[in-house]
Amino acid sequence: MSKADEVPLRQNAQQIISAIREEVASQKECLTRYCIQGIAFVGIVWGLVFKLDGFGWPFYFCNTLLIFLLLVIVRMANHKYSTINRNLGYELHLNRLKDYAGVGNPDWARKMMDVNWEEAMCAWRFVQPSIFEKIYQSSDKGFDDSLRPYIRKDEQCQPELYYWYETNALMPEGGSYHQGRYLHNIHRFLNTVGGFSLITMASFLAYKFLRFCVAAPSGYDFYFGLSKFAFVAVMFGGISYYYCSQVRRQTGIREILEGGILSIQSCAVVWRIVVTCHILGSLYPLSKNKGYYHYTTYTSALGLNFIGEYFNQPHDWLSKWETLYGTPELRKALHDLLHEVKPRPFKLDYLQAAKTVSITEFLRKFFRLITTPI
């Protein structure tokens, strides 16, 4: 690639990189502020409860809400870091374009550089989730699903495969990888505060129950007191199970963010796949119908083609389309792949007349709303 070709690539990349870095700095500042404010709020509520009511029954209700708040902050931390990694992955993708242009097709590199951020993000939202689900069993359809960690599929556990999305799997014998400790330390601190809250609840619940047994009330006082302890015990058991399951799930997501498919280096490769799907998915309907008719369908189908035939060899799939770009064979290859692709049948429930929702269905949807990871 000549110097004349190289300069525009760097200038365009720098404009996008500057905007990306501003958002990344904003996301990091936002994450730090949320964590500090969350811990400060927990401390203030603890102080008020201890001062006003000691370790009475409001203490357990407030502690339950505070533990839930801490778990929400942990989920938000993962969400923020997912955004940061995605943005920095795009920066890394842009920086690599000049290298690809030097050894491959410079017209393809320039075409990739011309893709705007919102265009790329549009394709990311239905190509990247398909790639993620190729690796992990993931479902967020209900309350039970939000309690389960992401489980790696057996087909992606074979030692002979090329795990381009796992940094540790790419290290040579004796090599090491340091992913940074900021998110890990945030998880550890928030989970420790939540665990301390649970231990405090258990300790004072046991203490109050022993005092209740020693006092040995009779009649109505006995049954009323026992019912209160039973209610708090059930609440404590529920929040403990929810806390442990969420710590396990969010820790798994953190590990994926640090060294898996959601890490910066893996996002760079995914971005190249996504942008390739976007360019080809828009090129085919524009050349065929002079519009974006079924753009989403074609772009997603290209992603599924990569997942189905080249998933553990992404560079072969990327090189194939880069080589075809600018040649007469490209249109034929796209036609052979996409001419029979159609949108899947989809039932538009929200267009139907309003239905009466049962109490059970309402509660199920409510718990799904408040427990779905951010």
Image: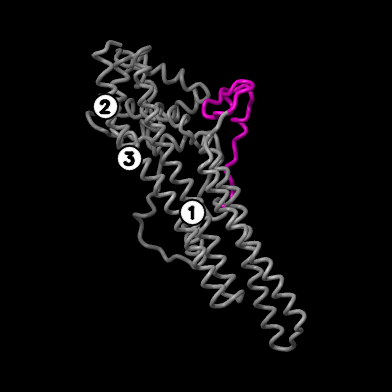
Region of the chain picked out in magenta, as a range: 147-176
Horizontal side of residue 282 vs 83, given as left or right? left
> Which residue position holds label 3?
22
- Is residue 339 at least partly visible in the picture? no
**Label 2 to label 1, Cα distance in Å?**
36 Å
Label 3 or label 1, whichever comes before in sequence order:
3
Horizontal side of residue 214 vs 336, given as left or right? right
Q: Residue 12's mark?
A: 2
SS at mark 2 in the image:
helix
Q: Nearer the viewer, residue 273 or 12?
A: 12
| Residue neighbourhood size for the residue with mark 3, other residues' Cα within 10 Å, grouped as few (<14), some (14–19), many (≥20) | few
Q: Where does residue 132 sit, x and y in percent of width and height?
A: 49, 36
SS at mark 1 in the image:
helix
Horizontal side of residue 263 vs 225, given as left or right? left
Q: Quadrant of residue 228?
A: bottom right
Q: Nearer the viewer, residue 215 or 131?
A: 215
> Which residue position holds label 1?
73
Tell me whether circle 3 and circle 2 mark residues in contact (CB < 8 Å). Answer: no
